[in-house]
Image (cartoon, rainbow, N blue to C red):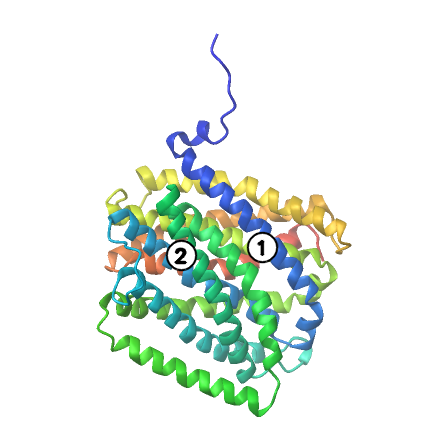
């Protein structure tokens, strides 16, 4: 008589179950740390009221970490798989040029994000209250972003070391773990940076110096003889700025719904996890597709074929349990900490309904963004994750608010 065994991942995905298992563990860790970020946001309710416009800015600031270091992890994964990676800090090495480009992008994008955030904040002017000024946004964006970037950089490099030593596939773990660390680190760093704003001439002087520094760094990178660094910077900066604008649009949706979130503070708890989980799922898929395109295992076609189809199936298999896990954990912990909530079942319904819509969206964007980028002769490692996470910020925030309306959370 044949022996019966339960094989939830293996039975559905066959040989791909190892990849799915690695990703599931990373996604659970990401969801857990994102909930901690959510509790941090709920705990900083007074800060959000004190500095109008800050909630609008948070998705873009957090998303920038993922858009910077997700692609970095993807490029390092490709380098490891193709045998071009070496562990050296020389500036002209693959690692050195990748790190230099990433940190330069962090500075330049943070300054630009601060400028655009102020314009968006003045458009929305929730409750007719004037938002913090442009200099305030720039200082918060650069100082908070730099602190977060340094921490996430160390984590990303640690993952690269771990992948080489323990046989991890960076494509399976980088997106969720970078997303998790970005969520966990960025918000406290931004709140810490608020101590430097609304300080009159000091804040304005700091903002001006940071803007000048960003211009100098951009000029040095563009004129650099390091071809890899220059290419990464030129290809990535426009997509990062576009991603930042889309994330700010998502922030407009959240800022406009701030009364709903403050009425049920558990929504502030679950929101970062909802957005980052969708971004992590899309990031995993984008990274895997980019690496397989480089290796010739995936041929971009109008209809996904072969390994591309398997990777998309993995994404859907992972989505359902991780969104249920996110909602249950948020509901249980919120209940034990006296956060206001519409109820656990409603949270699960909102998370699963919205989550599956978001998953379908990121699967389509991940695959077809890779197809378009390759057709234009660009590197999908530089573009896939920012395109997915930026478009997800807008769609994810709208889907989340829509799911709240569908399930009667007023």
**Seen in the image, is 258 located left or right of residue 115?**
right
The residue lying at 45 percent from left, 40 percent from top is 22
**Seen in the image, is 229 located left or right of residue 2?**
left
Q: Nearer the viewer, residue 302 or 110?
A: 110
Q: Of all residues shown, which one is farthest toward the right?
A: 338
Mark 2 in CB contact with mark 1 (< 8 angstroms): no
Dot 1: element: helix
Compared to residue 146, the image places residue 214 above or below, namely: below
Residue to which mark 2 is pinned:
157
The residue lying at 44 percent from left, 38 percent from top is 20
Q: Work out which quarter of the rendered image holds the C terminus and state it.
A: bottom right
Residue to which mark 1 is pinned:
34
Dot 2: element: helix
Q: Position of residue 352 (x, y in %)?
A: 59, 45
**Seen in the image, is 376 located left or right of residue 51?**
left
Q: Position of residue 282 (x, y in %)?
A: 44, 51
Compared to residue 315, the image places residue 403 above or below, namely: below
Q: Quadrant of residue 381?
A: bottom left
- Mark 2–mark 1 distance (CA, rounded to whole Å): 21 Å
The residue lying at 48 percent from left, 38 percent from top is 317
Count of residue discs:
2
């Amino acid at each position: 008589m044949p022996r019966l065994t339960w094989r939830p991942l293996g039975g559905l995905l066959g040989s791909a179950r190892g990849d799915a298992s690695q990703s599931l563990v990373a996604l659970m860790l990401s969801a857990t740390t994102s909930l901690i970020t959510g509790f941090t946001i709920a705990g900083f309710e007074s800060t959000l009221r004190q500095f109008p416009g800050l909630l609008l800015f948070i998705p873009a600031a957090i998303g920038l970490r993922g858009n910077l270091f997700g692609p970095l992890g993807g490029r390092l994964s490709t380098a490891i798989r193709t045998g071009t990676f070496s562990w050296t800090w020389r500036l002209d090495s693959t690692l050195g040029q990748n790190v230099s480009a990433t940190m330069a992008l962090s500075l330049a994008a943070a300054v630009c994000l601060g400028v655009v955030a102020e314009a968006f904040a003045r458009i929305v002017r929730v409750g007719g209250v004037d938002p913090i000024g442009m200099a305030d946004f720039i200082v918060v964006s650069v100082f908070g972003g730099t602190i977060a970037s340094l921490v996430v950089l160390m984590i990303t490099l640690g993952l690269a070391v771990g992948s080489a030593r323990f046989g991890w596939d960076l494509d399976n773990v980088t997106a969720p773990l970078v997303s998790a660390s970005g969520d966990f680190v960025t918000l406290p760093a931004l709140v810490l940076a608020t101590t430097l704003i609304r300080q009159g001439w000091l804040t304005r002087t700091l903002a001006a110096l940071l803007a000048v520094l960003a211009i100098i760094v951009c000029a040095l990178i563009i004129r650099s003889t390091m071809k890899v660094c220059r290419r990464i910077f030129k290809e990535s900066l426009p997509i990062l700025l576009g991603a930042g604008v889309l994330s700010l649009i998502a922030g407009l949706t959240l800022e406009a719904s701030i009364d709903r979130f403050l009425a049920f503070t558990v929504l502030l708890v679950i929101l970062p996890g909802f957005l980052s989980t969708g971004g992590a799922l899309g990031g995993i898929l984008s990274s895997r597709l980019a690496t397989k395109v480089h290796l010739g295992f995936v041929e971009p076609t109008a209809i996904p074929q072969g390994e591309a189809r398997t990777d998309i199936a993995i994404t859907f298999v992972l989505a359902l349990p991780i969104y249920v896990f996110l909602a249950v954990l948020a509901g249980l912990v919120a209940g034990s900490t006296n956060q206001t909530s519409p109820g656990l079942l409603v949270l699960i319904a909102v998370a699963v309904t919205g989550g599956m819509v978001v998953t379908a969206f990121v699967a389509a964007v991940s695959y077809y963004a890779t197809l378009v980028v390759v057709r234009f002769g660009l590197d999908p490692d530089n573009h896939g994750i920012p395109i997915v996470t930026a478009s997800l910020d807008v769609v994810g925030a709208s889907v989340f608010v829509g799911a709240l309306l569908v399930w009667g959370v007023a």
